[in-house]
Amino acid sequence: MSKANPAGAQLAESIGKLALDKKAENILIIDLLGTAAITDFFVVCSAATDMQVKAIADAVRKGTENKPWHIEGYDQLMWVLLDYVDVVVHIFRDSARGFYQLERLWADAPSRTIKDESEEIFSPPTD
């Protein structure tokens, strides 16, 4: 992750971990510094149900020190956007994420996946 905005990078990491705590899937942090003027980082994740999308959004909102500057999609729960200025969080229902493919738009930007470390340690070996 970029060192040019350490506070933004730290917020993105924190949000990724909050989403992971609520069992968000395919959590991706995209570093947009120097790529886009709209924000420095995207945190993109998905969930299977409306209730899970809401739980992730609520956990991020309650778990961050600052309130989001802007919120979109919270009533529909297909794609919730939480704008923290330096970090924009996208919480998708699985079907909406597949349709919009937001991460493909920023495929050239550096990114990293947030994974549950316990899953990596205890995963059964694949043949």
Image (cartoon, helix red, strand yellow):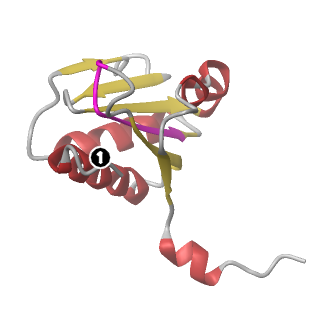
Which of the 4 quarters of the picture holds residue 122? bottom right
Against 114, is 108 above or below?
above
- Residue 97 in percent (x, y) is at 59, 28
Q: Residues within 10 Å of mark 1 (few under 14, many from 20)?
A: many
Left or right? Give the position of 22 relative to 60. right
> At x 19% / y 27%, what residue is drawn?
85
Amino acid carrying mark 1 in the image: Ala
- Residue 35 in percent (x, y) is at 39, 26
- Residue 45 within the magenta-colored segment of the rendering: yes
Question: Over which residues does the magenta segment extend?
Answer: 37-46
- Residue 15 within the magenta-colored segment of the rendering: no
Q: Main secondary structure of the magenta part?
A: strand
> At x 36% / y 43%, what residue is drawn?
55
> At x 48% / y 45%, what residue is drawn?
111
> At x 15% / y 48%, what residue is drawn?
7
The one nearer the camera, 101 or 107, is 107
The residue carrying mark 1 is: 12
- Residue 3 in percent (x, y) is at 25, 51
Against 91, is 15 above or below?
below
The one nearer the camera, 100 or 48, is 100
Left or right? Give the position of 67 relative to 37. left
Against 87, is 11 above or below?
below
Against 123, is 49 above or below?
above
